[in-house]
Amino acid sequence: MKARKICMIGDFAVGKTSLVSRFVSSTFGERYLTTVGVKIDTRAIELPSGDPLKLVLWDIAGKSAFARIDTSYLRDASGYLVVIDGTRPATLDNAIELQATVEQQLGGVPFGVLLNKTDLQGQWALSDDLVDPLNARGWSITPTSALSGDGVEQAFKDLGSQLVHEL
Amino acid sequence: MSDGLKLLSRYINRVLAHQTRPLFLELDDALQLRTSQGDGRRYGFRELKPGTPLDEALAMLATADPEDRTPQVWRFVELPGSCICHVHVLRLSQGWGVAMLDASAEHAEQQTRQQAAHELELLREERERLIAELEQANRLKSEFIARMSHEFRTPLTSVIGYSEQLREIRTGDQEAQRYLDAVGRGGRYLLNLVENLLDQARIEVDELTLNPGGCDLHEMSDEIELLLRPLAIQKQLSFAWWFDAEIPPRLWLDATRLKQVLINLVGNAIKFTRQGGVNVEFGWKEDWLQVSITDTGPGMKDAEAAVVFEPFRQGGDGKRGKGAGLGLAISQTLVRAMGGEIRLTTEKGEGSCFEFRIKAAAVQGSRPGSTEALRDKRIVLADDDTDLLELLRLYLSSAGIETEACQSSEETLSAVRKTTPDAVILDLDLGSDDGARLAARLREAGYQGPVILLTAAATRDGGAADETSTFAARWTKPISRARLIEGLAGLIG
């Protein structure tokens, strides 16, 4: 089976680990546990062509004032997902910076942007004004909720399909 | 290497090996195990026999570039079923060499530290978000109060003004006089309440402004006396004003603000005093006006006095009086804005004394304009409130001034072109028209006389044109007849 490496990047506490847990094992943990280093998981998906593809998911520790992204984890990645916390607008600004850093290292590989925590509508802080510039860049944006699972499966599979086009 | 160093090197290797429990793996290109050394179970491997497929357990190798021979080190890697480890990967001539070093202890330490830091950061972000939300809500509340208070001002101008007009017309009718006095008192009380609410809102949005000018303290005390004396009489209190002989005839200060402070402090003193009286004393020294208001009221305990200047609190004997509890808070802010400080001395059962001082330079060579000289002057009035236009017309005609009342920009422009008045008094908000724009159009049309702004808006609207250069004066509604006439005398008398 073909395998492709996907990196999860974004600020700390945006829900990267929860998204991978939802996608890989259909679970969600309420408690926030910060990631140090990288968690590696795999899940096979079926491509639209019917062919299987193993996604090797590198859930990389989030960026914060106390921890920088370790770019050695990005090596050989075929694609990546940039995660933004919809309740914290600052994570959107940081996501733009991070994407530029990753693109510098990996080149123009496929990537997707996840606006996570759509279940927290009462605290949602991303207006159209903030999100429109991302759309204007032509980025593929998917609203997701690791809690409910909304959008998660689709986001990973969409990126997986793009990776095969790149084969 | 000497024997000693060899010994030391072997010792350190043993210590490191004990701490990191290394597992060494050699795999072929198909990621099947060739050979291994170390405890595989620590890293999630049930068995490590030659030929065991490791493409699942070491999935990260499945996506590694076999052409890239740079050694790779990944720190703090968490693999399913494994302890957290540092992974070193070497590309061999055929296959892969992998070293896995237990980093659980180091990881736990880092995670504890980062977890605490991140949780703290999340709390800080949440606190900032809540503060921003509260500030926004508070701003909206203040804007709402300011807007509503402003809406009250124009009708109150009519209530107070017409009751005064009627009082003068019906001088022989004692019963009507009493009723009109009550209407006037009620209107002024309501106006004071509105002013306080408006000021509190302005203070909260940092829009409090001062408009200093020449002020006669005796005239001001007469106006306050007119307002507060009836209540003092009703409560059978003595009520006296004392003026130091050194006080100059006119002082440079914001008369409206000082009057507001005095109405609040003196009004409170009368309100809370049951017997005895209230004394107001003015002193002046080296450009500072000193004021004290002393009463024989119930006084306050220290705990009450400590919070008496906080908004929406009421002091006294703990019983809630009329009003919003804003008077003292606003008075303190106003006194500070005028360069001074307010002080309370009080004791339970022994009465209270509020003292403050504000900057007030003597006005040299001030010559008020002549009201007599206003006779036969022509004024164009522009306001969309017909009641107010009629009241202003009454006020001005009493001084022999001819007026023309207009309700729109076009009407005003036409009247000014036709009559070339001595002055134009206009409202900033002319219904659908903008008073500031009208003033500019008057100038464009060649009108040279003073254009005076009479507005219910207590704050300078940032969106409006620069008032300082556009208008000769800015007066706030409600305006008394005396103030209107005196103001005009200063400009065109």
Image (cartoon, helix red, strand yellow):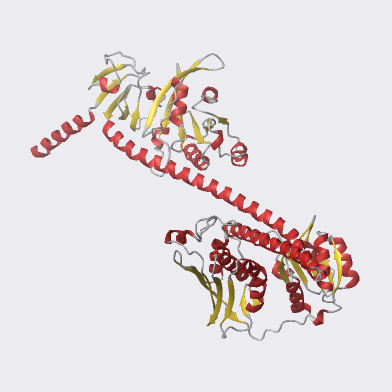
Name the side, left or right, on which A31 lies relative to B403: left
Name the side, left or right, on which A60 lies relative to B268: left
Q: Which residue is depicted at the point 51% across and 45% down?
A: B130
Q: Which residue is depicted at the point 25% across and 20% down?
A: B36
The residue most toward the right is B418
The quadrant in which residue A17 appears is top left
The quadrant in which residue B393 appears is bottom right
Using the image as rendered, state which of residue A89 and residue B345 is in the foreground: B345
Q: Quadrant of the N terminus of chain A?
A: top left
Residue B24: x and y in percent read 25, 24
Using the image as rendered, state which of residue B324 and residue B408 is in the foreground: B324
The residue most toward the left is B3
* Marker count (numbered): 0
Residue B481: x and y in percent read 76, 71
Residue B39: x and y in percent read 23, 21
Name the side, left or right, on which B373 lies relative to A127: right
Residue A51: x and y in percent read 52, 14
Q: In this rendering, is residue B441 above or below B52?
A: below
Name the side, left or right, on which B372 lies relative to A60: right
Q: In this rendering, is residue B209 above or below A56?
A: below
The quadrant in which residue B435 appears is bottom right
Q: Is residue B72 at all visible to an observer of this figure?
A: no
Q: Is residue B474 at all visible to an observer of this figure?
A: yes
